[in-house]
Image (cartoon, grey):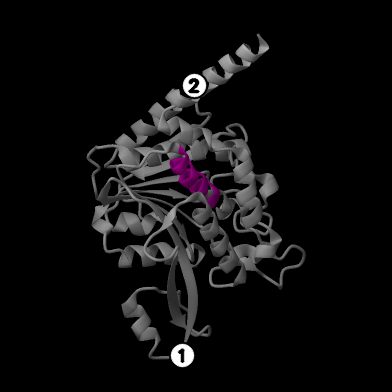
Amino acid sequence: MKKYCILALFCCLSYLAAAQSPVEKGLESINRTSAEAYIGFLAHDELQGREAGYHGSKIAAQYIASLLQAMGIQPVGDSYFQPFEAYRRERQKRGKLEVHPDSITLFKREVHQKLSMTNILGMIPGKNTSEYAIVGAHFDHLGIDPALEGDQIYNGADDNASGVSAVLQIARAFITSGKQPERNIIFAFWDGEEKGLLGSRYFVQTCPFISQIKGYLNFDMIGRNNKPQQPMHVVYFYTEANPTFEKWLKEDIKKYNLQLEPDYRPWDNPIGGSDNGPFAKAGVPIIWYHTDGHPDYHQPSDHADKLNWEKIVEITKASFLNAWNLANEKIKLYFQ
């Protein structure tokens, strides 16, 4: 009798697993343990604050690429790495790093600085290979300041290891779903954001299919509570011309019982703030998850033990559903 009960239970569980939809399978794969592992590595002292162009950032890039490979996410082109260089005048002359070829040509005529960086790009090919959705976050931070007394490492747990963890879990969730998306979906990890959105700017200015990108989903700082009375508060920026983006989140929160309190902020021209900017300037509709500033922003005290792990997981689940819609929905998205 016991044998038959076990067999019946096994059959029941197998039926329930089979009855799950692809999106539900993906959603179920998102968890706190993975968020802690990804953020714990990226925000560790050994990565020396992940300053763009320096040793810690290069380790972070290799780590992210190896995770994409292990998941079964293929590279965009022949490699996961999209190397690029930024230039500016020598340090006695004020000026910011630039990636535009015209600026680089001018800088090369005089004494100049050069910084080598790399974006990390992975992709799941869609059924329609002429359309794209992109999910991205910057992985660099501020590095080390040896002149500081006390803690000298800017670990950047919230800014932006938290965002990187979301993109990694979303990538794995798409694989776990077992379903090929309708359009190509790229998982992007930008270098040089803290030095002027360099990685995303380089990608946009060199992208041969920029007009075929149907939407860009951005993460920058998704793990803190600047409103103690609202621990699940999150700011949800989106291109105002696409109110469908707000509709998606409201429906998904209700359908999947997500514990979030979004502050919906439609933005007519969302060109500032983070890596959404270069995409918005190119006319690509954007969504940006952000949990606002806090006292540890751009401080050595931005540590993992201050993160709201439940909120990171809930935001990751909600944004996976956004990404699922961007990659699969057959709707009209309005460019700027």
Mark 2 lies on a secondary structure that is: helix
> Overall secondary structure of the magenta stretch?
helix
Residue that extends furthest to the top in the rendered view of this protein: 1
Q: Is residue 227 above or below residue 153?
A: above
Q: Nearer the viewer, mark 1 or mark 2?
A: 2
On the image, the x and y values in percent for residue 37 come to 64, 48
Q: Residue at x 39, y 85 (%)?
A: 107
Report if residue 248 lies within the magenta region.
no
On the image, the x and y values in percent for residue 77 come to 36, 63
Report which quarter residue 231 is drawn in: top right
Q: Which residue is mark 2?
A: 16
Q: Residue at x 42, y 56 (%)?
A: 74
Q: The residue under label 1 is which amino acid type?
A: Val
Q: Which residue is mark 1?
A: 111
Q: Is residue 130 above or below residue 256?
A: below
Report which quarter residue 206 is drawn in: bottom left
Q: Please tell me which residue lies in front, 59 or 273.
A: 59
Q: Residues within 10 Å of mark 1 (few under 14, many from 20)?
A: few
User: Does residue 211 appear in this view?
Assistant: yes
Chain part drawn in magenta:
164-176
